[in-house]
Amino acid sequence: MRTYILYGFGVLLCISGIGYLAVEYVKYLSEPGRLVCLFLIVGVLGFLGKYFEKIGW
Amino acid sequence: MRKNIFLYLALACFLALIAIFFVDGYMGIYDTTYVTVGEQEQIIEPDYWLPQRDAPAGYEIDYYISAEWGQNVSFRYEIDNRRFASYSTLVQASVWQENEKLFDLFSEEKSIGPFDKAIAEWELSAEELEEPVAGTSNQYTIKISWGEVTRRIVVDFYYPEEYYRDSVPPSLIIE
């Protein structure tokens, strides 16, 4: 259980880190860079969802 | 390993995301302009000029500032080299009016180390400019150029209130 709480904290920190980067630097990204970022965010959320589904959440 | 495969994939995507933000968003050469008129400082951040990057060739963005006639306008221009290699360029600033170059304000070769900044400073003195006749243009364009980049800052000089007071009959002035 403690491990999952730590994972939860890790996930929250990662998402807030991405939020900070998005606020500061997304305006400087090129169009292809923005598209790849969109795919990668979908990937992060999708894989996390699959992971939590697998462990029975 | 197999149980956590999706967690590892999510982590890989996260790291790739960070890498793209760093390489595409953070790295590069950026310029910030600090313009001081009187006691007020205005900061022109690099993102102000971004629409020019994606616009068709020839499209230029101006930044407007105003100053009272007689006031000096100070410029501090900062070039931030966020790359792993050094960067050398000739930084030039000149005064233009109606597409005609009047004089140079600054010209210096700058060499900037990796992840370092270079600062150029100059001042636009009203004494160097021709005092405009009332009713004519009193705008001057400061062109700052380095590499393939050109920034245009339009300085609009206005007359102090006393100038108009002298030319208006006293009966029309509302105190």
Image: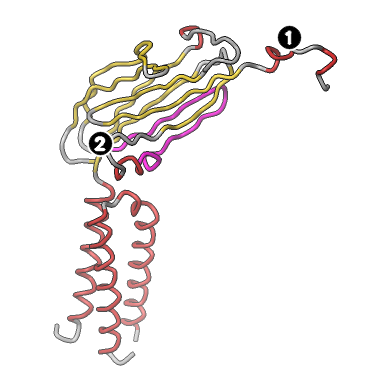
Q: Which residues are magenta?
A: B29-49
Q: Nearer the viewer, residue B31 or B48?
A: B48
Q: Which amino acid is tagged 1?
A: Asp
* Mark 2 or mark 1, whichever is nearer to me: 1
Quadrant where the C terminus of chain B is found in the figure: top right
Give the numbered dot on residue B166: 1
Report crowding for label 1: few under 14, some 14 to 19, many 20 or more residues within 10 A (C-alpha): few
Q: Is residue B13 left or right of residue B162?
A: left
Q: Residue B115's x, y, as percent? A: 24, 38
The secondary structure making up most of the magenta span is: strand
- What is the C-alpha distance between the residues marked 2 and 1? 51 Å
Q: Which residue is mark 2?
A: B81
Of marks 2 and 1, which one's residue comes earlier in the chain? 2
Read off the chain for label 2: B
Could you tell me if the residues under marks 2 and 1 are in contact, i.e. CB atoms within 8 Å? no
Identify the coloring. secondary structure
Q: Residue B162's x, y, as percent? A: 70, 13
Residue plotted at (22% across, 28% down): B147
Q: Residue B88's x, y, as percent? A: 19, 27
